[in-house]
Image (cartoon, rainbow, N blue to C red):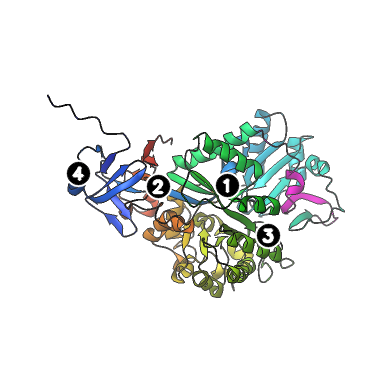
């Protein structure tokens, strides 16, 4: 008597019923076979069904199957810590922000008063808040509230006193302590000055650090991400990631970029970079050249139009960055350089060009943000082989005040995505979470419209710089994979790639931008295993 056929292994599946989204566009009548965490075959449904009769069938009711998104620039621990701080995003004025903070302080009566997300550019008058505004709420409790971009902090008098910051305190290297006309600190610290207070906040325990990382990764997975480039991790975070990886507790893949700490950098670079894809790997080093445009810390070639006394900040001496970028490249790791202003982008391109003369390494150097770039410098990205790691939603968040910072003669330098793409630059998309919402569908709509969800500005901000939906999807999938040096493994639906797959219930190619912003992930597979999604 013949034996009944054994049940197929759960890792062996034929997924059909949805259109496939590839770099060639939307493909109908195609299916995907996955086995042991990899894509075994892609092709016509009938052909694959005949070739793989024992594969478990997964029937999708239409919609689109695409590679899992790759978050190209996020701060995972910061995203995971959001629930442990006052959320100050959203209020349209200072009183509303203070009211939200007052409620959080009442619910968390002990320890530091922590928060993130305020943005003075959204308030009437656009003036920075002051320590005195916080004192009535915080009293003797030190308060530390990060601006939405993380490049400025608003602190109260207790925190200033704790840090010993007074009228005679000089600006630290790469930072600025804002002071009033009488020389008193106002309570606003920019870039390098933020650390004067932040270093005093008690560090989280190892268990808390792991919990934050897991929470951040889980939030990304719920948005449809199967991998993330975590931009700027320190010694303790690296150790936490390695513990989680050893325990098999990472919900998505992590590519970690170390903080620019010379001793940490050299210690990690000596170990060599893992060539084979795994759930956790140290990928490179995150460097900072300048600050952010919103806090006037981005380094510009000419003074700010709305504050002619400053051109912004060099957060790190470009000569120091140049030396360590060269070391990073020669060690086979990837330099990722934060550059927002046009002067910072030019300096980043210059020092990359010099470093590549000494040895290109195996991975392309990256410039993170590339927000304000002259046309001549935008053309250099493609020529040098530099990845343009950009966050489309920054454009739609910042469009209302960017012209005031830059003035009419150079506003066309802002967010030059089309110029970068036409010049041959590899585009890699991210969100900079928790600075912005990591939702990739919001970013995709921003890339093709250059409008915020309310439809502003009409016609889009500098609409000639828009990208197509296919270009935007590529930048979130195969573009990020190529930027990470894993073009064959990640971000693609092709034989041999890992089975990191996302299914959405809608035809991605034909949605309006308004509908695109509302899309939610429906099913997700990481390494061939379907994982739960929370909305």
Quadrant the C terminus occupies: top left
Label 2, label 3: how many angstroms apart (C-alpha)? 35 Å
Residue at 58 percent across and 54 percent down: it is 284
Would residue 34 appear left or right of 159 to someone viewing this image?
A: left
Dot 2 falls on a residue whose secondary structure is loop
**Magenta-highlighted residues:** 180-205
SS of the residue under disc 4? helix
How busy is the neighbourhood of tag 1: few (under 14 within 10 Å), some, or many (20 plus)?
many
Front residue (pair 476, 508)? 476
Can residue 401 be seen here? The reply is no
Whether residue 126 is in magenta: the answer is no
Mark 1 to mark 2 CA distance (whole Å)? 19 Å
- Mark number displayed over residue 49: 4
Residue 191 in the magenta stretch? The answer is yes
Q: Quadrant of the N terminus?
A: top left
352 or 29, which lies in front? 352
Left or right, residue 29 beside residue 204: left
Q: Earlier in the sequence, mark 2 or mark 3?
A: 2
Q: Is residue 38 above or below residue 478?
A: above
Mark-to-mark CA distance, 1 and 3: 20 Å
Q: Which sits earlier in the primary sequence, circle 3 or circle 4?
A: 4
Q: In the image, residue 124 lies at what x, y percent?
A: 64, 52
Q: Which mark is residue 75?
A: 1
User: How crowded is the residue under tag 2: few (<14 C-alpha within 10 Å), some, or many (20+)?
Assistant: many
On the image, numbered disc 3 is attached to which residue?
A: 297
On residue 136, the disc is none
């Amino acid at each position: 008597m013949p034996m009944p056929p054994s049940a197929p292994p759960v890792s062996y599946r034929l997924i059909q019923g949805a259109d496939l989204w590839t770099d060639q566009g939307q493909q109908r009548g195609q299916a995907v076979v996955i086995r042991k965490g990899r894509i075994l075959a892609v092709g016509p449904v009938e052909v694959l069904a005949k070739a793989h009769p024992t594969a478990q069938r997964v029937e999708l009711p239409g919609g689109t199957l695409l590679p899992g998104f790759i978050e190209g620039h996020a701060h995972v621990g910061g995203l995971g810590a959001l629930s442990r701080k006052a959320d100050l995003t959203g209020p349209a004025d200072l009183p509303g922000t203070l009211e939200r903070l007052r409620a959080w302080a009442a619910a968390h009566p002990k320890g530091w008063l922590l928060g993130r997300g305020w943005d003075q550019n959204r308030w009437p008058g656009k003036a920075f808040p002051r320590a005195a505004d916080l004192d009535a709420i915080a009293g003797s409790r030190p308060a530390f509230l990060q601006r939405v971009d993380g490049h400025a902090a608003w602190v109260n008098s207790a925190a200033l006193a704790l840090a010993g910051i007074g009228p005679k305190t000089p600006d630290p290297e790469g930072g600025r302590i804002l002071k009033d006309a009488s020389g008193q600190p106002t309570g606003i610290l920019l870039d390098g000055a933020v650390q004067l207070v932040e270093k005093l906040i008690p560090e989280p325990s190892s268990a808390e650090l792991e919990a934050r990382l897991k929470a951040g990764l889980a939030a990304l997975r719920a948005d449809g991400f199967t991998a993330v480039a975590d931009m700027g991790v320190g010694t303790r975070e690296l150790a936490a990631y390695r513990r989680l990886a050893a325990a098999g507790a990472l919900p998505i893949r992590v590519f970690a970029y170390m903080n620019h700490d010379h001793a940490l950098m050299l210690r990690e670079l000596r170990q060599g970079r893992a060539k084979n894809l795994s759930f956790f790997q140290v990928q490179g080093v995150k460097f900072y050249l300048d600050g952010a445009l919103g806090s006037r810390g981005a380094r510009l070639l000419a003074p700010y139009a709305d504050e002619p006394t400053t051109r912004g900040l060099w957060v790190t001496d470009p000569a120091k960055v140049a030396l360590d970028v060269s070391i990073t490249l020669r060690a086979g790791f990837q330099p990722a350089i934060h550059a927002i202003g046009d002067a910072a982008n030019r300096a980043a391109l210059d020092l990359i060009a010099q470093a590549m003369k000494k040895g290109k390494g195996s991975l392309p150097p990256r410039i993170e943000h590339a927000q304000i770039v002259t046309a001549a410098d935008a053309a250099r990205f493609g020529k040098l082989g530099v990845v343009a790691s950009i966050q489309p939603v920054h454009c739609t968040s910042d469009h209302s005040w960017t012209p005031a910072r830059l003035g009419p003669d150079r506003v066309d330098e802002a967010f030059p995505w089309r110029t970068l793409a036409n010049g041959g630059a590899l585009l890699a998309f991210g969100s900079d979470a928790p600075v912005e919402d990591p939702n990739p569908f919001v970013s995709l709509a921003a890339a093709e419209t250059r409008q915020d969800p309310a439809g502003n500005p009409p016609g889009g901000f500098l609409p000639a710089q828009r990208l197509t939906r296919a270009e935007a999807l590529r930048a979130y999938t195969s573009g990020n994979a190529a930027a990470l040096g894993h073009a064959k493994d990640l971000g693609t639906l092709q034989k041999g790639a890992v089975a990191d797959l996302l299914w959405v219930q809608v035809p991605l190619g034909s949605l309006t931008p308004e509908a695109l912003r509302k899309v939610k992930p429906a099913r997700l597979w990481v390494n061939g295993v379907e994982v739960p999604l929370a909305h």
